[in-house]
Image (spheres, grey):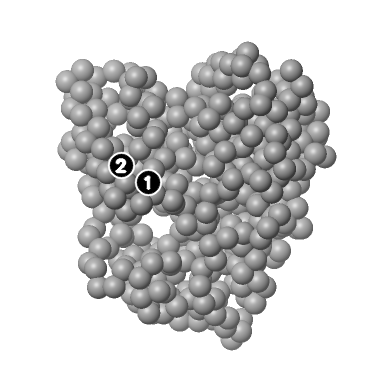
Amino acid sequence: MGESLHTVTAMPTARQPGCPFDPPAELIDARGHGPISRYPFPDGHQGWLITGYDLVRSVLADRRFSSRKELMRHHPLIDYGDIEVPPAPPGEFLLMDDPQHSRYRKPLAGKFTVRRMRLLTERVEQITAEHLDAMEETGPPTDLVTAFAKPIPAIMICELLGVPYQDRGSFQENIDKFMSGETSDEDLFAAYTATQHYLGELVAAKRANPTDDVLSDLTDSDLTDEELKGMSLILLAAGLDTTTNMLALGTFALLRNPAQLAALRADPALADRAVEELLRYLSVAKTFMRTALQDVELGGHTIEAGTTVILSVNTANRDPERFTDPHVLNLRRQDGGHLAFGHGIHQCLGQQLARVEMRVALPALLNRFPTLRLAVPADEVALRPETADIYGVKSLPVTWDA
């Protein structure tokens, strides 16, 4: 027999006051009842919520669970009624299964190897230094999101895909609108449409005049313009928003844990482990969803074919059966293996780039400004809502002794 069956009646939309880094208390409570719970979706569909590390990892690796957009008919927070969900547009491979998924992922996999990302370290160091110089010249206080956390990954992913410098501001603005979780449906559609239009023009420009970037390389394949446009959208949205929020929320977490911050400043060799621990502790990509293609036995329960499951990555990465003192930020932690980048065939392609950016940028920031601190009380830092695809801070006011 499996664990006793618990029901979570609604996905929480807020974190506990004073606990901006911890998953919502209802999710932690659900994990306390067992790794799998019932979840009634707003449209009446009886789904499942998985909060335990082992089960989340197993579903992510199980081909009996699908990522196809048209099968994910049940939003955890919204009742869409009888609206038919179409398949993912060409190229948007995160919302596809094999063989379509592999058709798009394989040409990209060689572009994001560990070796290639390490070769980009020098460029990340240069961009980081330029933004630290600008912060120092302008002087305190500043919003760390706009001055530091956002531009570093934005420049890197735009350079990799060949987005011209003069276009990056408007492009970033539109990406922000459909990732923030707080945009009206009208503005969301307008931002998405504008981004799609821009990417179409960018693909055409790369076909006509290839440059030294990933998108130009892909124009030499059998991929259509529509497919390249969809792939570019996925890469840009994922490469910009996730690392931005890891840099900002990671800094916030370190400033609230001065002993850990001091350890990282004192020991540069700790950077790699610190990055992995921040990824585990913060888990900014909070949830994934899958739909069962057939009946699957999971945690002592039968997940029926056609049933949608929510995978709570942030509670899986805080699972006490997998991690010692899981709610403690410990940069010297030995028990690794977090799921912040997912697992299985959809594991994040850009994870090595994100690691390089964090490994370079966070220590450089902390060493350049030894007196860096919050410029407002911690409970006044504006946080993204749980409805946002990626969790983080809207802004992070910081100051230092000039």
Number of other residues with Cα within 10 Å of mark 2, as a class: few under 14, some 14 to 19, many 20 or more: many
- Residue receiving disc 1: 178
Rendered-image quadrant of the C terminus: top right
Which kind of residue does numbered mark 1 sit on?
Phe
Residue 284 visible at all: yes
x 51%, y 72%: residue = 10
Does 20 appear above or below 200? below
How many labels were placed on the picture?
A: 2
Name the residue at 39% across, 23% down. Answer: 159
Q: Is residue 295 left or right of residue 209?
A: right
Few, some or many residues within 10 Å of mark 1 (<14, 14–19, 20+): many
Q: Residue at x 43, y 66 (%)?
A: 77
N-term-proximal mark, 2 vs 1? 1
Q: Position of residue 58 (x, y in %)?
A: 51, 64
**Residue 120 horizontal/vertical position (percent):** 50, 22
Amino acid under label 2?
Ala
Q: Quadrant of the N terminus?
A: bottom right
Q: Residue at x 48, y 76 (%)?
A: 39
Q: Are marks 2 and 1 in contact (CB under 8 Å)?
A: yes
User: Disc 2 designates what residue?
Assistant: 191
Q: Is residue 106 visible?
A: no
In this rendering, the answer to whether 40 lies above or below 256 is below
Q: Residue 235 versus residue 118: which sits nearer the camera?
A: 235
For this rendering, which residue is in front, 184 or 166? 184
Q: Locate residue 96 relative to residue 265 in the image: left or right.
A: left
Q: Nearer the viewer, residue 192 or 357?
A: 192
Q: Which sits in the foreground, 3 or 283?
A: 283
